[in-house]
Amino acid sequence: MKLTLKIWRQKSPKDEGKFETYQLDNASQDMTFLEMLDAMNEKLISEDKDPVAFEHDCREGICGSCAMMINGKPHGPGKEITTCQLNMKAFKDGDTIMVEPWRTNSFPIIKDLVVDRSAFEKIMEAGGFIDVDVAAVPDANAYPVEKHKAEEAFDAAECIGCGACVAACKNSSAMLFVAAKVSQYALLPQGKIEGVQRAWNMLMKMDELGFGSCANTGACETECPKGISLAHIARLNREFIKAGFTKLAGEKR
Amino acid sequence: MTVLDSKIPEGPLADKWTNHKNSLKLVSPANKKKMEIIMVGTGVAGAAAAASLGQMGYKVKVFCYQDSPRRAHSVAAQGGINASKNYRNDNDSDYRLFYDMLKGGDFRAREANVYRAAEVSNSIIDQLTAQGVPFAREYGGTLATRSFGGVQVSRTFYASGQTGQQVLLGSYTALKRQIAKGNVTMYSRRQMLDIVVKDGQTQGIVCRNLVTGEMERYAAHAVVLATGGYGTIYFLSTLAVNASGAAAYTAYKRGAFFANPSFIQIHPSCIPQLNEYQSKLTLMSESLRNDGRVWVPKEKGDKRKPGDIPVEERDYYLERRYPAFGNLVPRDIASRAAKERCDAGYGVGETGYAVYLDFADAIKAQGKKTIKAKYGNLFDLYQKITGENPYQQPMKIYPAGHYTMGGIWVDYNLMTTVPGLFAIGEANFSDHGANRLGASSLMQGSGDGYFILPYTIGGYLADKIKSKPLSTDDPEFEKVENEAKNKIERLMNIKGNTSPLAFHKKLGKIMWDHAGMARNEEGLKKGLKEVTDLEEEFYKDLKLTGDTSSMNQPLEKALRVAASFEISRLMLRDALNRKESCGAHFREEYQTEDGEAMRNDDQYMYVAAWQYKGDGKEPVLHKEELKFEFVTPTKRSYK
Ligand SMILES: Cc1cc2nc3c(=O)[nH]c(=O)nc-3n(C[C@H](O)[C@H](O)[C@H](O)COP(=O)(O)OP(=O)(O)OC[C@H]3O[C@@H](n4cnc5c(N)ncnc54)[C@H](O)[C@@H]3O)c2cc1C
Ligand code: SF4
Ligand code: FES
């Protein structure tokens, strides 16, 4: 099938960047979206042009590398899929497709569709872990976890750190990402102990890094490729309020 | 006489590791602060090791090519992680796990290493659970397990079909904690291009910053490679598409021996290639064979829908050939059996290169809800890719390249033949022999990372406390950096017509055809020639665009492909040398009448370790004889 691709091209972080229009005549509905971009890049190379930079690795929806806005939607059309899982069957011959990077100040553009998501790393370093040393642990069966709680914790832990939630949010909030981690640990006895402090530290870091506050529109949940539920944000808020009440976290800060 | 010293400690099997640990020298806390370690790789092995070493007080620098350590290929592991907890009271033990792995590897691994891997397995589950890994639970709240191929106990811990993600994130968060404490510094978006060796000792690495294109030098007292496997040699594989053996190849060129390069696992249950555009194959976890039954029609070329073929007209060939293990035979056996049926004309699907993995009986017996709880996300993944609903019709699967048992040769301390250069996780060759059992790689990588390397590296560093790392201004750093720069310039200046992706595809086809599931002398020799011809073409006709002073993804790829030619040749040579069939290495000339692998213990009971002798020169083979003191190698039978 024939496609018209409008792709954001930006040489470097400082470059202004603009949309370029390309024609691709040999696309197929059998391709995945990234295979289509591969074909596009092969064509650009053959024309002595710089291929479009985009991130990808696992190509099966689990590493969280791939990240782009396709026709204005994070990871494109389709529910609960990443860009690498998007099939070209979602498009038809003659379509024009707009492809651009995540648009948020917290994720500066590096090149073309590649953005710098290191702000997520900083949030994780602020408290996205359980404070436990290697080898200083009890037997794994020492603390039973109710099956449904373990499953809920797993649902939260499925977050792949792609950043679609931020890209989807009109305030560029990272609430769903933070909530997923806080909630996973809050549901487990191992993680509960520092739950309140963790919520405080991660949220403060999120603020500091310039992510906006939760807009309560649920756009993040709709666009999240892993279906991370808004219920986790509610749990995060509860932990955060506790932190405020006890002032414990505030003092430690 | 061989120059290889495996440094296996004396004493009874079960005491070796404890005795060895007790004899290892320690580095005092004050000195640890002065000792610098470079960790290349952030998969289950690298992340765990960096976290562990950081906690101990070493100064650690960690590198990965992705934007975040959380994206390492380990994240894609699905089915589970083994441990000999015996939580099911099915008479499991360290010994049994050890024996299963050793037998699964067709007696081509070291007893002592494998036993140690089993011995530390339980601590891994404890560690990960404490770090908040949400493993599956029973109703009573204790940890659940399931069975994997090649074993008769239930010892595989799991988190739905995303165990690798959860195990990696567990170690990633431990790494984050050490980064927050300032013990570990993270360098992501770096491609390690070379290793600096001077005065017979590892001194550091040279990397390309993937954002700025700049060359960077880093010095340390020791370098650890946790850079994963080279399964992408086939182009289409279950690995992350940017995974490669390029880092291991660099180590090889700098003097580290490469062991058993031809031992590469072809996983039996992957979604078959659907079209010519495909860039990767997706695994359907081995855990599915717990409940799924593998079959093909009894009639050649039977084109009826699977549901229309009555049970009597189906050939459940694994159950027929291997009644003791049935659908849960090890991977090499299941893969070959699928190939045999398809080559004989019984395959299904459009191409005839697929077999059914059928859940109808399991759904009938256990209900859809139970099956969904066990494998829901795998079924969804399958449906997303193929558009077919595995609750209603059987999956179609076919083998694909998956895991490299071969890798950098290491001694019992996980040190390579280059002093101060260590290798852990899939990058080394140590624990899986000629075939890896399911759920044992996350285990080995985590074990190496958390509990083995952090002790053994101390033994090396204890003698180095008086020395500082080499200055990065040293002429040796200069030289290595220039070599890397020249290599890049050379590639950029070829200005031919073919992209690195196109070369990778061609190489993959050669390797799959000649060094895939079945090998023979003629094909392997042909493969050697074809790889060398292709390499020549590569240096004449490669085309790269863009520049070297900013992000240039095709250049990154070209550097990986350039390394793959030599790895391919090593694989082919090693496969030619090994005139026997063992594990995943199947030489058609050496098989029994009923098509089973025919091992030759008299002549090939050794690890084949290859030494680099210069570009264009034949590498030299060193043999590490495998001694079996505690078990008697038997004919591997799953019948
Ligand atoms: C689809 C799939 C499913 C699997 N399922 C299971 C399972 O259920 N159970 C199990 O036990 N095993 C499983 N495996 C195998 C297992 O996942 C891997 O063997 C294991 O995760 C490898 O871990 P690692 O730490 O050695 O390396 P990897 O996770 O491969 O990490 C390699 C690291 O090295 C870095 N790196 C590599 N080269 C360079 C370079 N040149 N410069 C800088 N950095 C570099 C990368 O950035 C990355 O951080 C599966 C494998 C696949 C493909
Ligand atoms: S919460 Fe969802 S959208 Fe946000 S980073 Fe995680 S997986 Fe991506
Ligand atoms: S490439 Fe890994 S999630 Fe898309």
Image: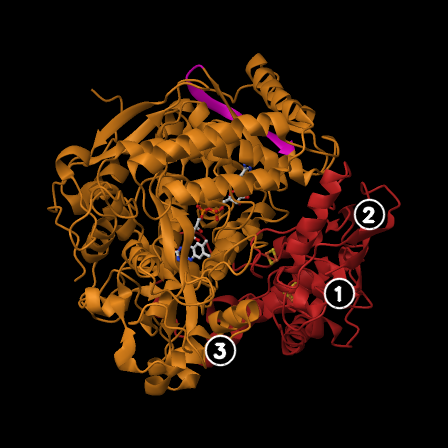
Which labelled disc corresponds to residue A9?
Answer: 2
Sooner in the amino-acid sequence: mark 2 or mark 3: 2
Dominant secondary structure of the residues highlighted in magenta in the image: strand
Q: Name the mark nearer the viewer: 2 or 3.
A: 2
> Label 2 vs label 3: CA separation?
45 Å
Camera-side residue of B595 and B208: B595
Question: Which image quadrant is residue B365 in?
Answer: bottom left
Can you give x and y, in whole percent of width and height, for residue B573 in the image? 34, 31
Q: Which residue is label 3 attached to?
A: A149
What residue is drawn where x is 78% and y is 68%?
Answer: A169
- Amino acid type of the residue tagged 1 in the rendering: Asp
State the quadrant of the N terminus of chain A: bottom right
Camera-side residue of B179 and A109: A109
Q: Which residue is label 1 attached to?
A: A93
Q: Is residue B493 above or below residue B384?
A: above
Q: Which residues are magenta?
A: B199-208
- Amino acid type of the residue tagged 2 in the rendering: Arg
> Label 2 vs label 1: CA separation?
24 Å
